[in-house]
Amino acid sequence: MRTILFIAFLFSSLTVCGHDTELSIKITNIKNIEGKVDIGIYNYGENFPKVGKDYKNIILDVDSSTVIYKIDNLPEGEYAIAVFHDKNSDGVCNKNFLGIPTEGYGFSNNVKPLFSAPSFDKTKFTLKGSVTITISLIY
């Protein structure tokens, strides 16, 4: 009986831990081939899209009008992505006096904000298996 329970436990552990994921993030419409692209991946609604509150942050050099980044083995679940083109490489999304970004930005699901950043619920997607998210920057 103990052997059967042990074998059942082993198989249940394998099914919980055996999920491989791959998230491909494709950033398009980069207007200037200079600076960096800052990608924030969020897994919690109240943190989105607050700087420094992301689950994972990736900063890539811009070398073409499209940048692709792949991440393996993130836990399955719901995520949202916020991106900005840090053209001058100063580490912040620069804004004008009205608070409107002067550098390119974008969100998962290509949500276009009206008066403020979109909510986590509007930008979230489910990561299960292999997923590609394409974000077209807004200038």
Image: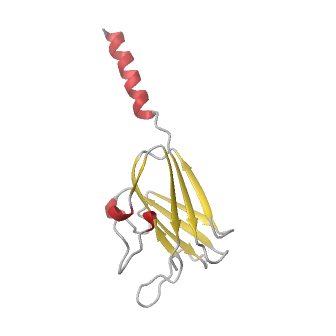
Residue 5 shown left or right of residue 38 in the figure: left
Nearer-the-camera pick, 106 or 42: 106
Rendering coords of residue 129 (x, y %): 48, 43
Note whether 103 is above or below 46 in the view shown: below
Rendering coords of residue 136 (x, y %): 53, 69
Nearer-the-camera pick, 112 or 104: 112
Residue 69 shown left or right of residue 2 in the figure: right
Residue 1 shown left or right of residue 66 in the figure: left
Name the image quarter holding the N terminus.
Answer: top left
Rendering coords of residue 113 (x, y %): 39, 75
Nearer-the-camera pick, 123 or 55: 123
Note whether 27 is above or below 101 in the view shown: above
Note whether 83 is above or below 69 in the view shown: below
Nearer-the-camera pick, 99 or 135: 135
Which residue lies most toward the top here?
1
State the residue at coordinates (37%, 26%): 12
Q: How is the image coloured?
A: secondary structure
State the residue at coordinates (34%, 12%): 4
Which residue lies most toward the bottom here?
97
Rendering coords of residue 110 (x, y %): 45, 67
How many marks can you see?
A: 0
Q: Quadrant of residue 109?
A: bottom left
